[in-house]
Image (spheres, rainbow, N blue to C red):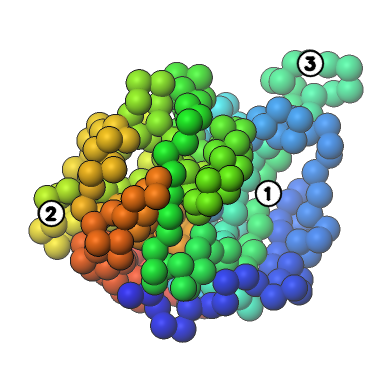
Amino acid sequence: MNPSNSPPDRPADNAFDQGVAWLDGHFVPLSEARISVFDHGFTRSDATYDVAHVYRRRVFRLDRHIARFMRSLKSLRFEIPFDSDGLRALLLEAVRQTALDDAWIMMICTRGRPPFGSRDIRLCRNNLIVCVVPFIWLATPAQREAGLTATVSTLVRIPPHSVDPRVKNFHWLDFVRSIFEAQERGSDLAFLCGEDGRVTEGAGFNVFMVKGGEVLTPADGVLEGITRASVLDICADEGVPARVAVFDAAALRAADEIFVTTTSGGIVPVVRLDDRPIGDGRPGPVTRKLNEIYWRRHESAPWSEPIDI
Ligand code: PLP
């Protein structure tokens, strides 16, 4: 169900040397990409970012990632010295500086730091940082084939009216605690609910369930993932009933199939939730079909384009 010649689970030890970073107007080796410890991106998580990916030397839905990043920048009042076309050219050039076939393209904007002694964030010079790093997978090939296990976290997702989850951010402490909780329960992943009990998302992925042949994903209170949008697009193209919806953990537990979606690995089946099998405890037919189509769409336009032209 997954590409047979998937790269290894983890990049080689020298992986860092294979990537490249761009900051302050220059390309540098990743090991030389540094920001000040006084940058508010570090001290206050005052930053936004996006991650697109390259698979077999083709970039996937880059314009979607750039558009989301641009919206995030605007929402947080960040300024960068590029428009969408300029950023796109920079990102592609960064990938061309590497020989990586499968990679993450990270774009990060931090607030920077105000002049020493000032607390006026309007005086900060925002920092745009681009990093191309070897692809980092959410799950190993074996896990992607057999499916992951998950738990419904006791932690409440940071409310969307406090930190807008549609603006991709590093406010990860609810996720970090949920990761420890999942590990303590022997699960691979944790799903977080909102204050009202609605299922939201987890640390770096969106959640889907299949019930009675219909594909459902939380309507709001989540990052509008590019992989999530891709699944909804594929469903529309293939005539698979799908919609965004509001559902709680009880509905999720009663699902026929569950999967998560992320740039770091696509569509990954979840076969157990809180120690109970989902369906027959194996990746279901809808998940498998969507996953196959998702990876096929990496082979050609319009969703994917070659890096080297
Ligand atoms: N939700 C959160 C909180 C994420 O951080 C991510 C990706 O990092 C996703 C969902 C999945 O988004 P995408 O499919 O664009 O990678």
**Which numbered disc covers residue 79?**
none
| Mark 3 lies within 8 Å of ligand 1 (Cβ measured) | no
Tag in front: 2 or 3? 2
Q: Quadrant of residue 131?
A: bottom right
Work out whether mark 2 precedes mark 1 in sequence or the reverse, and give the earlier one.
Answer: 1
Q: Quadrant of residue 191?
A: top left
Locate the N terminus and report the quarter of the image it occupies.
bottom left
**Residue at figure coordinates x 57%, y 77% from the top left:** 8
Question: Residue lying farthest bottom?
Answer: 5
- Residue 82 shows in this picture: no
**Residue at figure coordinates x 56%, y 32% from the top left:** 174
The crowding category of the residue bearing disc 3, from other C-alpha atoms within 10 Å (few below 14, some 14 to 19, many at least 20), is: few
Q: Looking at the picture, which amino acid does disc 1 mark?
A: Ile
Q: Looking at the picture, which amino acid does disc 3 mark?
A: Arg
Work out whether mark 1 precedes mark 3 in sequence or the reverse, and give the earlier one.
Answer: 3
**Residue at figure coordinates x 47%, y 36% from the top left:** 153
Question: Residue lying farthest right?
Answer: 116
Please tell me which residue lies in front, 7 or 49: 7
Tag in front: 2 or 1? 2
**Which numbered disc covers residue 119?**
3
**Residue at figure coordinates x 58%, y 63% from the top left:** 136
Q: Quadrant of residue 274?
A: top left
Q: Looking at the picture, which amino acid does disc 2 mark?
A: Gly
Residue underneath mark 1: 129
Find numbered disc 1 in the image and state the secondary structure of the residue it sits on.
strand
